Image (spheres, rainbow, N blue to C red):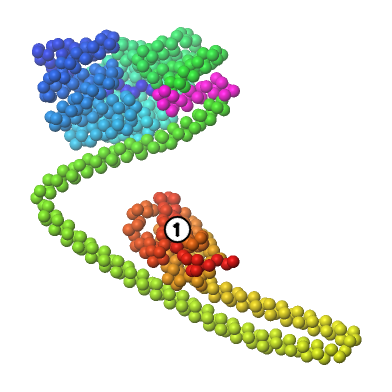
Amino acid sequence: MCVFFGCSKKNTKKIPITSSEDSLSSYFSLANDFSLPRQKRQEYNQKAFDIVVNHENDSLNRVNLFKVANRYYNINNWKDFSKAVHLVLKKSESAKDTINIAKAFTYLGDYYESQAITDSAFLFYYKAEKMYNKLSDNINLSKALINKATLQFKSGDFLGSEKAVFNVLRIIKGEKQVNSILYDAYNLLGITYSELGEFDKAIEYNNKALSVIDDEIIPVEFQSRATSYNNIGFLYLNSQKYILAKEYFQKGLEQKKLNIQKPALYAMLLDNLAYSKFKLKDSDRLPELFYESLKLRDSLQLTSGIFVNKIHLSEYFSSRKDTIKALKYSKEALLLSRETKNSRDILVALKQLAVIQPQKASVYSKEYIRINEELQKAERKIGDKFSRIEYETDQIKGENTDLETKNRNLLFGFSAFTMLGLFLYIIKAQKTKNRELLFKQEQQKVNEEIYNLMISQQSTIETNRIVEKKRVAQELHDGVLGRMFGVRMNLDGLNKFNDEMAVNQRNSYLSELKNIEQDIREISHDLNREKSELINNFVAIVNNLFEEQKKTFEPKLVTIIDSAIKWESLSNAVKINLYRIIQESLQNINKYANANTIKVEIKKKGDDLFLSINDDGVGFNVNKAKRGIGIQNIQSRTNECDGTVEIKSNKGEGTTITITVPIEQKQILTEK
């Protein structure tokens, strides 16, 4: 559940102190004496700070301020640590001391990381990285990158952390005296692969970390071996190899002065040893080991460690059927995780409570699922958030640099720049006017072609209508009227007779009259269909366009045209523009969208005519596309109809174009 990260980040160099500074040197030594109580170390460090703060702002003064900050760091006094770092940063900026500015940025990153403010921590680590890179200081650059990678790991961005560590290994290749950096890099890779479930790689890099430990380079008080033993033991614990896990935890606890120099690590090893013994059903010194670890963590205010201890105690008492104590510790763990707003810990506590109280498992499970989904969404955003911080920081730096350059050059080239700007403006304005003129000419030409096409179709329809009229007249004259005349004459002849034969013949002629009536009805229907075709000639033109689209291109085309619209009452200008908008949109979809389905719908709602064109293609950036000629054509044609156009599109989400044309009731009438 909890893995200890590497050695202490604060490796203070020993600066020679003159005889006049003996008291200050003494305070520094006592403040860093791990055998003294925390309160005493705090008092000595405060005395050192009171002396240093009043000294002149020189390089030695800034070094001493960093020493003060280091000792505050080692006793977890974050408030005074922040105060000391901000002071040394202010003095370094005043003296334009680039090296110490970068170092102060690193310390501020440490501070914000301790307060779980990941955005600010990452920002300051990134600033330090940029400065060390500019100074070509590969050693400190690598340390800054390790800090960033550690932060990415803690935030759940394991792949980003892995990438950053390998970048560090590339940078320090060939450098001397880099064991401490190699240790941190291998250690971080080990716990990263542990989280990624790659057990063999995790073991490999933890063993590499052990192999580079050099007591002359990495001070023994950092307890690097105990850290690596704990990490390897934790890997075996997760792999359910409890005997091996127990051995490594015991190795860690055997390191000299561990409880004094690294009490937090000592408490962690105690808890992990107790947990491995619990899994092995070894009751020796249980639950005393758990209690000892919990007491130490509580005194150090190690919230995450306290949580882990209480979960382990809950599991222990649950296995011994002591439900009351198991429930007590799991509820305390849940309360603590909610106070610290640690979603991962909340999930662990809910899972444990569901085991202890199966009757309430459904309630805990619902909350577990909800929090887990929120956590996954948050973790997916972590990498993007860090990338955005880097981008925005670089952008601000670039803008500041550009601004300084512009201000400097402005004194010498303002007049020339103004003249050049005016000249470019005139050229651009002229090009814009020419482009607009060419666009309007092209549009006029296209409108004329469409209008001529519609007139030609109208003429063809009119010719067909005349031919059809002649056919109907001839059919009525030669067919229907002739038959009716013959039936009338025969009926007149039969009026003189009343016998059975005459009756049968009359019935026969009456049937013939019914047939003639049916023929007349069919001719009437044909005339109505002809009228409908004449009315919907615009629909026929659009349908021809749709048929051509279906034959030529692969996407499925779905079309819906409101049959209640009376197109013959709509002005030619509006119809031409609607046709061209549809044509332009289909061309754009065919060229760029890579769509599977296209839907075109024309309908009337109230006093507005709606044209909607939708595709499920790759989409595009609407803001950038607004400058394209295709979008401009659609916008221009919509404006000519006094309408509005709305374009919705995103990368990978398709495109929807909606044209709304306001119309009066007299322009388009629906069928009653």
The quarter of the displayed image where residue 342 is located: top left
Q: Where does the image place residue 199, in percent across and percent down from the top left?
A: 42, 28
Residue type marked 1: Thr
- Classify 425 as above or below 102: below
Residue 491 appears left or right of 146: right
Q: Is residue 357 magenta?
A: yes
Q: The residue tagged with tag 1: helix, strand or loop?
A: strand
The quarter of the displayed image where residue 76 is located: top left
Q: Is residue 563 magenta?
A: no
Q: Is 642 or 165 nearer to us in this picture? A: 642
- Residue drawn at x 18%, y 28% as measured from the top left: 90
Residue bearing the label numbered 1: 658
- Classify 548 as above or below 117: below
- Residue drawn at x 26%, y 27% as measured from the top left: 108
Magenta part of the chain: 338-360
Q: Is 332 or 2 nearer to us in this picture? A: 332
